[in-house]
Image: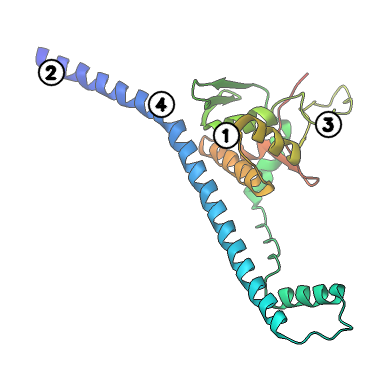
């Protein structure tokens, strides 16, 4: 009986050690996945630029071999080149249409209008953090933690208009350009508009994985984002 008890205690200690290791490693793994995805986006963009340059070089070479009439001004030549680019499919692709929201998403989006009452962000030594959204915890990588702290900051963004006594006040929306600039200052890394959209998508995904309403991360048509956090 004594041996079985000792074995049980040892198994519990080992399990506790594995849990602690998992908690320590999880933010680092999330950050590594984000970095890999960022590098893949950069590689894809560089490949696209390389293809563009090769095609433009070919077209310029063909123009050089052709006889150019003297009345063809540089402006007209530029127009011809731009037309050739459009015909060859080199012009940027039109943005893909967003998928329509499901009925469930619409209901959740309406529910998010009541906002977050209790919010806390506990940072870790490595820069990652644990966020508490109305009592539900969610582990965040360094980048997502910084983004959420900005989205929840009542001092960043346009000053909210005075609300009526019966109306709930929320932290203001933040312009996406300002969010990108602040993230760059905090993390010493460039953040494009596409990078920011991807981070917002990932943050919403982390919320959803923990059973938190992802639409508490709100966006506005004017290119603004915030956490629907109440404040007095």
Mark 3 in CB contact with mark 2 (< 8 angstroms): no
Check the image and report above or below for 87 versus 35: below
Q: Circle 2 sits in a helix, a strand or a loop, which is it? A: helix
The label on residue 24 is 4
Q: Which residue is mark 2?
A: 4
First in residue order: circle 3 vs circle 2: 2
Mark 1 in CB contact with mark 4 (< 8 angstroms): no
Q: Circle 3 sits in a helix, a strand or a loop, which is it? A: loop
First in residue order: circle 3 vs circle 1: 1
Q: Which residue is mark 1?
A: 143
Mark 3 in CB contact with mark 1 (< 8 angstroms): no
- Picture coordinates of residue 150, whole percent (x, y): 68, 29
Name the residue at 57% across, 24% down: 132
First in residue order: circle 1 vs circle 4: 4
Graded by Cα atoms within 10 Å as few (under 14), some (14 to 19) or many (20 or more), the crowding at tag 2 reads few
| Quadrant of the rendered image containing residue 44 | bottom right
Q: Is residue 47 left or right of residue 118?
A: left
Q: CA distance from mark 1 to mark 4?
A: 16 Å
The residue mark sitting in front, 3 or 1, is: 1
- Picture coordinates of residue 78, whole percent (x, y): 81, 72
First in residue order: circle 2 vs circle 4: 2
Q: Which residue is mark 3?
A: 158
Q: Circle 1 sits in a helix, a strand or a loop, which is it? A: helix
């Amino acid at each position: 009986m004594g041996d079985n008890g000792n074995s049980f205690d040892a198994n519990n200690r080992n399990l506790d050690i594995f849990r602690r290791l998992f908690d320590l490693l999880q933010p680092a793994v999330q950050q590594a996945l984000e970095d890999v995805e960022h590098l893949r986006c950069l590689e894809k963009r560089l490949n696209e630029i390389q293809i563009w340059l090769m095609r433009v070089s070919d077209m310029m070479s063909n123009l050089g071999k052709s006889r150019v009439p003297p009345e063809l001004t540089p402006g007209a030549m530029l127009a011809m080149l731009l037309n050739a680019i459009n015909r060859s499919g080199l012009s940027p692709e039109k943005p893909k249409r967003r998928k329509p929201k499901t009925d469930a998403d619409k209901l959740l989006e309406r529910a998010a209008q009541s906002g977050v009452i209790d919010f806390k962000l506990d940072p870790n030594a490595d820069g990652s953090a644990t966020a508490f959204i109305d009592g539900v915890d969610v582990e965040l990588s360094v980048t997502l933690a910084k983004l959420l702290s900005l989205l929840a900051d009542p001092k960043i963004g346009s000053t909210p208009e005075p609300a009526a006594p019966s109306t709930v006040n929320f932290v203001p929306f933040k312009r996406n350009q300002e969010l990108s600039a602040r993230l760059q200052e905090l993390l010493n890394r460039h953040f494009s508009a596409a990078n920011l959209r991807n981070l917002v998508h990932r943050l919403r995904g982390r919320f959803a994985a923990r059973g938190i309403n992802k639409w508490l991360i709100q966006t506005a048509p004017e290119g603004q984002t915030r956490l629907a956090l109440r404040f007095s």
